[in-house]
Image (cartoon, rainbow, N blue to C red):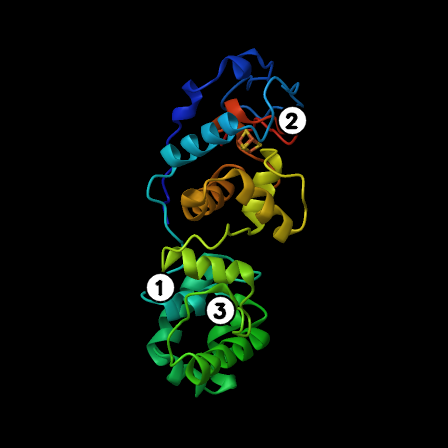
Amino acid sequence: MPTSKPQNPAKNARTPAQGARNAPKPASQNATAPSTKPKRSRTIKPRSPERVAAILTSLRAAYPNVVCALTHRNAFELTIATILSAQTTDVNVNKVTPELFKLYPTPQKLAQASLNELETILKPTGFFRSKSKNIKAAAQVLVDTFHSKVPETIDELIQLPGVARKTANVVLGSWFGLPSGVVVDTHVLRLSRRLELTTSIAPENVEKDLQKIIPQDRWIQFSHELIHHGRQICIARRPLCADCTLEPLCNSADKTWTSH
Ligand code: SF4
């Protein structure tokens, strides 16, 4: 997971339409200014191919080669780590998985684990009782149904307890390199709405909206890029718009100009 600040090439990538936009600028890079609502440009449609392409170009430049932040060495570990990432941060998951996979390195070993031992290891991730049951049961399904191999289709993956479409997309995209869908987590959902790429609220509908406008060969990296942008810059409560590579392209009413 990159820890350095993203590059910001799109500061110079305004289109004529964006240049005409009268968005407010930070009064001071070091001062806390009140959030203001910029006037919104409607000279180009939010989901137009040229605007979407500009967003994709800026994200790729800002987060080149970004990868999944969950530590893993194989598809099994990524599947389990992604199940554990529900309702917690990847950082928290990465703190417990080294011990977990040291003790239970294979589906067979994990399926035989005691729930008490799993709960002790997983406690820092929250919801540790249900997560312990899910990963043990998921390992059992891998053993019983899939010859201890992680399957490579969504329909098969969602047979594993604790695995829904989002988790399946993470595994298929990040390990197998299969663009099965767009991973819509809390960051992708928030940013897609702020960037007016969707007006939907339900993740499954957001994913459908994104799939219509994002080329399929960008689905995997687009998710990674947006997740990292959401963690580092387009933060939920106070986005760091003065530092945002997408600012020239963004008409969000949530913009704030607090610099850090
Ligand atoms: S950080 Fe600000 S300018 Fe950038 S995408 Fe988020 S709301 Fe828009």
Earlier in the chain: of badge 3 and badge 2, it is 2
Reading the image, the residue beneath label 1 is 72
Tell us which disc is closer to us: 1 or 3: 3
Left or right relative to 166: residue 73: left
* Residue in the picture at 40% in, 71% down: 150
Q: Which amino acid does label 1 sit on?
A: His
Q: Position of residue 13 (x, y in %)?
A: 43, 20
Q: In the rendered view, would you say 249 is above or below 71? A: above
Disc 3 within 8 angstroms of ligand 1 (CB): no
Q: Where is residue 192 in the image (x, y as percent from the top left)?
A: 58, 39
| The quadrant where residue 130 appears | bottom right
Reading the image, the residue beneath label 3 is 157
Left or right relative to 235: residue 62: left
Say which element carries label 2: loop
Mark 2 closeness class: few <14, some 14–19, many ≥20 residues within 10 Å? some
Q: What residue type is labelled 2?
A: Ser
Earlier in the chain: of badge 1 and badge 3, it is 1
**Ligand 1 appears in which quadrant?**
top right
The answer to whether residue 205 shows anywhere in this view is: yes
Residues tagged 1 and 2 counted as in contact (Cβ below 8 A): no
Residue nearest the viewer, comparing 235 with 41: 41
Earlier in the chain: of badge 1 and badge 2, it is 2
* Residue in the picture at 55% in, 17% down: 25
Q: Where is residue 205 in the image (x, y as percent from the top left)?
A: 64, 49
Q: Position of residue 95 (x, y in %)?
A: 41, 64
| The quadrant where residue 245 appears | top left
Residue nearest the viewer, comparing 117 with 44: 44
Tell us which disc is closer to us: 1 or 2: 1
CA gap, disc 3 and disc 2: 43 Å
Reading the image, the residue beneath label 2 is 35
CA gap, disc 1 and disc 3: 18 Å
Mark 3 closeness class: few <14, some 14–19, many ≥20 residues within 10 Å? many
